[in-house]
Amino acid sequence: MRHLVLRESTGLRYFTFFYLYVMQGIPAGFGLTAVVNYLIGKNLSAATVATFSAVVGLPWALQFVWGR
């Protein structure tokens, strides 16, 4: 049986990158759309919903710093 090693397989590296990118985006998409819509539906104030959205989106807004 052949062992899968990232440094030896270009295709596996691309697949892993794509998979991790998608898995990062699913919680962000959920947190920034579905939960915000739910909170709006519960008649929370606009300031509360905006604060939640900003806190959830902060890691993605600052990820360029981590990528340096």
Image (spheres, grey):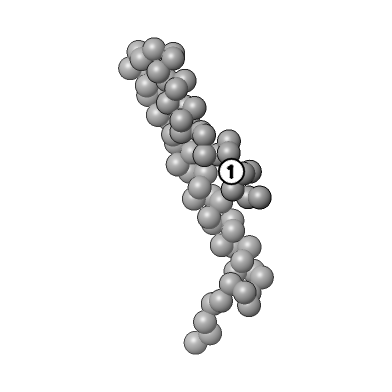
Q: Is residue 5 visible?
A: yes
Q: Residue shown at 58%/36% (left/top)?
A: 61
- Please provide percent x and percent y for residue 10: 66, 70
- Local packing at callout 1 (Cα closer than 10 Å; few below 14, some 14-19, many 20+) is few
Q: Is residue 33 visible?
A: no
Q: Residue shown at 35%/13% (left/top)?
A: 43
Q: Residue furthest bottom?
A: 1
- Please provide percent x and percent y for residue 8: 63, 77
Q: Element type at marker 1? A: helix
Is residue 1 toward the left or the right of residue 45 in the image? right
Picture layout, residue 66 above or below residue 29: below
- Please provide percent x and percent y for residue 21: 56, 51
Residue to which mark 1 is pinned: 63
Q: Nearer the viewer, residue 7 or 4?
A: 7
Picture layout, residue 68 above or below residue 16: above
Q: Residue shown at 39%/12% (left/top)?
A: 45
Q: Nearer the viewer, residue 59 or 46?
A: 59
Amino acid type, residue under disc 1 in the picture: Gln
- Picture quadrant where residue 5 is located: bottom right
Is residue 32 toward the left or the right of residue 9 in the image? left
Is residue 12 toward the left or the right of residue 55 in the image? right
Is residue 7 toward the left or the right of residue 22 in the image? right
Q: Residue shown at 62%/44% (left/top)?
A: 65
